[in-house]
């Protein structure tokens, strides 16, 4: 069962923490509430960062809850077997995380007023982050050589499927009033300004002190030191952080240190093919 994947509607999921039954329930039966807030990403795009920001906005910058409750209980990944139970039992207003592509998301969301915040990241950095993560996250298959894993990533032959499909799918909701998107790179460049934008979307007003609290406690350093946010409480059989960390480098542009020129050019070619004709521009388009 370790490192075994199953397919659900053409997308791979690791059997250790997901099940067909759970995914069917999420898609068809999960009751989304109008006051739910969803933290949606393609994996390795800044999910736990946004989770921390949203937790802190909710508590007006007070870090007490972030320091006492593990992030997976504050904003459970509702497509996992355990996360679904937590999401169901959490008190409203609920914060729920998800890596699901839009076509597998809870159908009831589309009839609700619930909000989705979608965080995107330069896919080259997503790839590099995933390459390291796959070496420490036990439910995932060993990624092997970087070159070979890159081919799989570009073909969407990894858990949660293709980055391109995920982003194109979710970004189709642009313009809907309950959909907000932001990039990892914007969070990096201007965390305070990003938090202000997120607050406007959520209809939440924070004073300057509360904003300071969010920005300080959602920093990479603060999160790395917080055992409720750095996954040091995760069982070893799921995550082994001996050789690399979940909160690994926390920078934009690490791909430049990890990909060869040929790998980067190959990536660019597939990116152009996949994203051509879309009226979408991202911070990394200029780099
Ligand atoms: P790296 O592996 O590049 O360091 P996810 O939560 O979607 O799995 O994404 C994990 C990535 O987000 C990791 O990237 C992690 O270090 C980064 N990250 C998490 N919290 C962060 C923060 N506060 N500031 C910057 N990067 C952060």
Image (cartoon, rainbow, N blue to C red):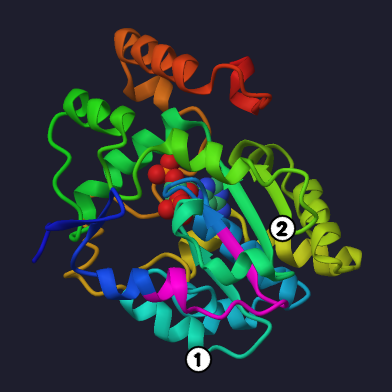
The residue wearing badge 2 is 215
Residue at the far left: name it.
1
Q: Where 10 falls versus 266 (above or below)?
A: below
Identify which residue, 141 or 210, lies in the foreground: 141
Q: Where 111 falls versus 59 (above or below)?
A: above
Q: Position of residue 77 (x, y in %)?
A: 44, 69
Q: Which mark is residue 246?
A: none
Q: Which residue lies at the image location 12% right of the left edge and 57% below the top edge?
A: 3
* Quadrant of the rendering where the C terminus is positioned: top right
Identify which residue, 116 or 132, lies in the foreground: 116
Q: Position of residue 131 (x, y in %)?
A: 28, 39
Crowd rating for badge 1 (residues with CA inside 10 Å; few <14, some 14–19, many 20+): few
Whether residue 97 sits left or right of residue 238 in the image: it is right
Q: Which residue lies at the image location 73% right of the left edge and 75% below the top edge?
A: 58
Tell me the CA gap for discs 1 and 2: 29 Å
Crowd rating for badge 2 (residues with CA inside 10 Å; few <14, some 14–19, many 20+): many
Point out the tag, 1 or 2, that comes first from the N-terminus. 1
Identify which residue, 256 or 107, lies in the foreground: 107
Identify which residue, 214 or 144, lies in the foreground: 144
Q: Where 35 falls versus 193 (above or below)?
A: below
């Amino acid at each position: 069962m370790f490192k075994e994947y199953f397919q659900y509607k053409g997308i791979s999921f690791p059997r250790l923490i997901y099940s067909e039954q759970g995914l069917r329930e999420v898609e068809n039966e999960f009751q989304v509430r109008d006051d739910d807030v969803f933290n949606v990403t393609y994996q390795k795009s800044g999910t736990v960062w946004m989770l921390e920001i949203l937790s802190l906005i909710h508590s007006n910058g007070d870090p007490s809850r972030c320091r006492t409750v593990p992030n997976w209980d504050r904003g459970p990944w509702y497509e996992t077997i355990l996360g679904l139970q937590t999401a169901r039992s959490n008190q409203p207003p609920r914060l729920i995380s998800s890596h699901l592509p839009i076509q597998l998301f809870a159908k009831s969301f589309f009839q609700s007023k619930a909000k989705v915040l979608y965080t995107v990241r330069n896919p080259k950095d997503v790839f590099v982050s995933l390459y390291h993560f796959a070496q420490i996250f036990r439910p995932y298959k060993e990624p092997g050589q970087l070159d070979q894993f890159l081919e799989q990533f570009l073909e969407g032959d990894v858990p949660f499927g293709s980055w391109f499909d995920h982003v194109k799918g979710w970004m189709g909701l642009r313009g809907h009033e309950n959909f907000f998107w932001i990039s990892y790179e914007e969070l990096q460049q201007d965390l305070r300004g990003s938090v202000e934008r997120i607050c406007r979307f959520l209809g939440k007003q924070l004073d300057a002190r509360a904003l300071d609290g969010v920005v300080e406690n959602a920093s990479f350093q603060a999160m790395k030191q917080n055992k409720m946010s750095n996954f040091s409480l995760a069982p070893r059989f799921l995550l082994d952080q001996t050789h690399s960390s979940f909160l690994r480098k926390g920078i934009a542009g690490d791909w430049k240190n990890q990909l060869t020129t040929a790998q980067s050019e190959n990536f660019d070619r597939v990116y152009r093919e996949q994203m051509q004709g879309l009226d979408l521009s991202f911070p990394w388009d200029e780099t």
